[in-house]
Every structure is written in structure tokens, then in C-alpha cells.
């Protein structure tokens, strides 16, 4: 095999790998949904059931989705725990004490006080490769605004890969919304994304140096 042919095959392999990665997700924007108006996204309780040891527990998964958002999104992201605490403070209802359907009902009734949208993550993990769906709803009326799904032959049933999929969702949501923005608005969003990346590097540095949990050590301003 000549060097030129070998190089050509390498380039083809890179292209095919990139194509697979790019084709790994699908998104749908509902008619009349204005993604540019979204300022704050709350993380709702995921539709998820752990099937393998390497997968996260459901509350850890909800926290990982939140961390993925606050480290990558240009929007403010509110954790499930923070919304649950706010509902308890404002209504006296502890949704942690309720069964899942009732907790979801109470969450949906009150989440508009704390965020203009919320995201429900559904994981289909009954086959070799998981398939993750992220549904963004308008908090005011519960209408679906945006859907992002991802499945790939390199996506495993692990906390790390689930977190990476969540990061990809938040990034793509920003990129899709960005297309409707003016030049000035787009620049402002990119600055917020840059701040999120800088914050993440700082958190990871703190964790590396101290060995302590990054969530407890650093709070986003």
C-alpha cells in the first residue's frame, strides 16, 4: 500500500467517524416555539431506570444533567433539588415524599415560578446502546417546545457518557437558538458560553487540587 493511498484511507476514516458523530443526534423545534426567549431551564425528574452497575442512580443522574447545563449552557439552569426545595418552601409540599406521578404533577404545577422552561430526560436503555431524549417544555402552559435525541455506537451506559450526552443537548440547544439571534445577541450568548467554560475549568482545577467535590467547593455566581 502506497503512502498516498494509506493517507487517503485515513482521511476517509476520519470523515466517516465525523459523519457518524454528526448524525448521532436529531432535533425538532415545535411550531411557534421561540427558543430565543428561553432564559432559565429547570431540570425535571428524569424518566429513567438503572439497568446496569455502571449507570448512575436516578438522583445522581438528575444532578449530572444540571451540572452539564451549568457548565455549558448560556442560560441559567436550575437543579431538580432547588425546584423541589422552593416548592416545599412556598407551598409546604415535599415532593420527595410523594410517588413519582404525584410528584411530577406538583412539579409541573409550580415550576413556572422558578423557570420559564423545564427539561425532562428520558433514557431508553433496554438494548446494547442507550438512546437519550431531552424534551424541553414551556413552564407556563406545559407545551413541548424542543426535542433532542442522541444515540451512537460510542455511547455507553455510564454516568460519564450520560453526562456527555446532556452537555451535547445544552450546547445544541444554544446553537439552534443562536440562529435566530441578531449579531449583537449572538455575541452576548457566546460570551455567556465562554464564561460557562471558564467556570468549568476553574471547578475542575479546584477538584483536582483539593480532592473535594466540585459542586460543594464552587458555586456559580
Image: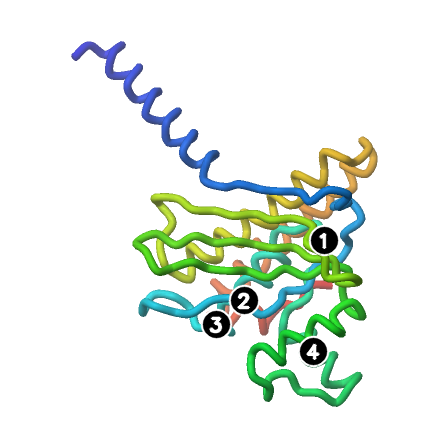
Tell me the SS state at disc 2: loop
Residue 105, image x, y percentages: 67, 75
Q: Is residue 2 left or right of residue 54?
A: left
Question: In what element is the residue under mark 3?
Answer: helix
Q: Which residue is mark 4?
A: 106
x 52%, y 48%: residue:
149
Q: Are marks 4 and 1 in contact (CB under 8 Å)?
A: no
Residue drawn at (36%, 58%), measured in percent from left and top? 157
Residue 103, percent across and down?
62, 79
Q: Earlier in the sequence, mark 2 or mark 3?
A: 2
Is 108 positioned to the left or the right of 205 in the image? right
* As drawn, 120 above or below 165: below
Residue 145: numbered disc: none
Q: Residue at x 78, y 41 (%)?
A: 188
Q: Quadrant of residue 219?
A: bottom right
Closest to the camera, between mark 1 and mark 2, is 2
Check if mark 2's residue and mark 3's residue have beta carbons within 8 Å.
yes
The residues tagged by marks 4 and 1 sit, at their Cα atoms, a distance apart of 24 Å
Which numbered dot is residue 58?
3
In front: label 4 or label 1: 4
CA separation in Å, label 1 and label 2: 20 Å
Which of label 2 and label 4 is nearer to you?
Answer: 4
Identify the residue under disc 1: 75
Q: Up-down: is 194 above or below 71?
A: above
Give the residue number, with chain letter if any, for mark 2.
Answer: 46
Q: Nearer the viewer, residue 84 or 126?
A: 126
Amino acid at each position: 500500500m502506497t503512502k498516498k493511498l494509506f493517507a487517503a484511507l485515513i482521511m476517509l476514516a476520519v470523515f466517516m467517524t465525523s459523519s457518524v458523530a454528526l448524525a448521532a443526534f436529531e432535533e425538532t423545534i415545535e411550531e411557534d416555539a421561540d427558543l430565543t426567549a428561553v432564559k432559565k431551564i429547570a431540570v425535571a425528574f428524569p424518566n429513567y431506570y438503572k439497568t446496569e452497575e455502571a449507570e448512575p442512580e436516578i438522583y445522581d443522574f438528575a444532578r449530572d444533567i444540571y451540572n452539564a447545563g451549568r457548565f455549558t449552557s448560556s442560560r441559567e439552569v436550575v437543579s431538580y433539588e432547588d425546584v423541589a426545595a422552593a416548592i416545599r418552601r412556598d407551598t409546604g409540599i415535599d415532593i420527595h415524599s410523594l410517588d413519582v406521578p404525584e410528584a411530577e404533577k406538583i412539579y409541573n404545577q409550580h415550576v413556572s415560578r422558578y423557570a420559564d422552561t423545564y427539561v425532562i430526560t428520558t433514557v431508553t436503555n433496554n438494548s446494547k446502546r442507550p438512546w437519550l431524549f431531552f424534551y424541553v417544555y414551556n413552564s407556563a402552559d406545559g407545551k413541548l417546545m424542543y426535542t433532542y435525541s442522541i444515540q451512537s455506537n460510542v455511547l455507553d451506559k455510564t454516568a460519564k457518557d450520560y453526562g456527555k450526552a446532556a452537555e451535547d443537548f445544552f450546547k445544541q440547544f444554544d446553537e439552534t437558538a443562536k440562529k435566530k439571534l441578531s449579531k449583537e445577541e449572538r455575541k452576548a450568548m457566546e460570551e455567556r458560553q465562554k464564561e460557562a467554560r471558564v467556570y468549568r475549568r476553574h471547578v475542575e482545577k479546584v477538584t483536582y487540587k483539593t480532592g473535594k467535590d466540585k459542586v460543594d467547593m464552587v458555586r456559580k455566581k
